[in-house]
Amino acid sequence: MRRMICLVCSLAVLVAGPAAWSGEYLDGIEVPADATYVGSEDCLACHEEVGEFYAHSPHLPELGLSVPGRADIFGCEACHGPGSLHVDEGGDGWIMGLDIMRALDDVSRANMCTQCHLSLDLQYADGPHAGTEVSCADCHADQVHFGGQARPANEYRNRSEFCLQCHTAVSAAFRLPFRHRVLEGDIGCADCHDHHGGNDRTTWEGANATCLSCHNQMAGPFVFEHGGTTGEQCTSCHLPHGSHNDKLLTQDGNGLCLQCHYEVVNGDPSFDFGGVPHNGLLQGEARCYDCHREIHGSNVSPSFRDQ
């Protein structure tokens, strides 16, 4: 019956899409030529505690979940390799045990998981955790019995606090006077970040898509476009997690605007900008956006004033 379940699971994966198993996970490991697959029942006869760990998990051995394209590789052996030698020698024979797994690099550890989780393979390769020595098990410690030190996400009422275990600098930013309300639970890390695949930052649209998905009123198109918002990333002016300044601005006062509009203070005592003297304004406490309020773009004013 277990073999029938295994075969059904394998066929389901194959029908869903191309999933030919390449063996990439074990390609760089010296597996004895005479080692064969024996099934999880032989493993659990000795490793009862592992069976108890997986009893209420998606990796329950009795489900017979197999490596796509390989109905003979399922359960424990999908990660630990063929177990016949280990079983025949009473636990002394070759197996992908703890010592070997600890020696794997982060790419091999990721391959161990993505040989089954095929949809995440390319995503992880381009994601924020690739190449950082952070493996799947470091985050999914509640689903693999050799997991990392992180507390599982299901132990947090606010799931974003799970991410902040490692991203401590971001945690501090969420406690600044002006911030995205992540600690309060109004928004979560996953609302902005794809933790597997990362975010597209190769184009202006990709870099700003996350911000504009919520702040769509800033997206335009506008009759009068502000070059600073159509050619730059949102993060050129705004700190995405938290700031000491209103609107999450990178700095207070007029210094932010003058980084680009430096001609205003370039030797002209009247601070003439656009034919309008600004000396009486800029030398006081006025801020540029006190007047130019439609700073992202306007449909009525070329100077972005709200008329």
Image (tube, helix red, strand yellow):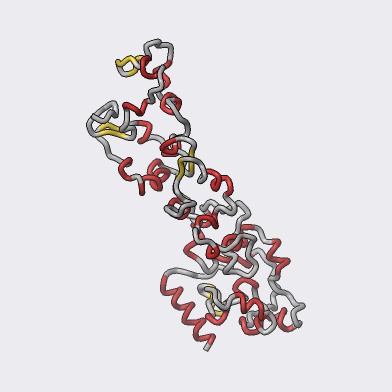
Q: Quadrant of residue 146 in the image?
A: bottom right
In front: 241, or 246?
246
Give the residue displayed 69% in from the left and 75% down from the top. 33
In front: 194, or 295?
295
In front: 184, or 95?
184
In front: 248, or 16?
248
Residue 273, above or below 256 = above
Residue 52 in picture, x, y percent from top left: 62, 78
Give the residue displayed 36% in from the left and 15% down from the top. 280
Q: Quadrant of residue 253 in the image?
A: top left
Residue 302 in picture, x, y percent from top left: 26, 27
Residue 160 in picture, x, y percent from top left: 50, 55
Q: Is residue 21 left or right of residue 105?
A: left
Residue 74, above or below 248 = below
Residue 81 in picture, x, y percent from top left: 64, 73
Q: How many marks?
A: 0
Give the position of the C terminus as an image quadrant.
Answer: top left
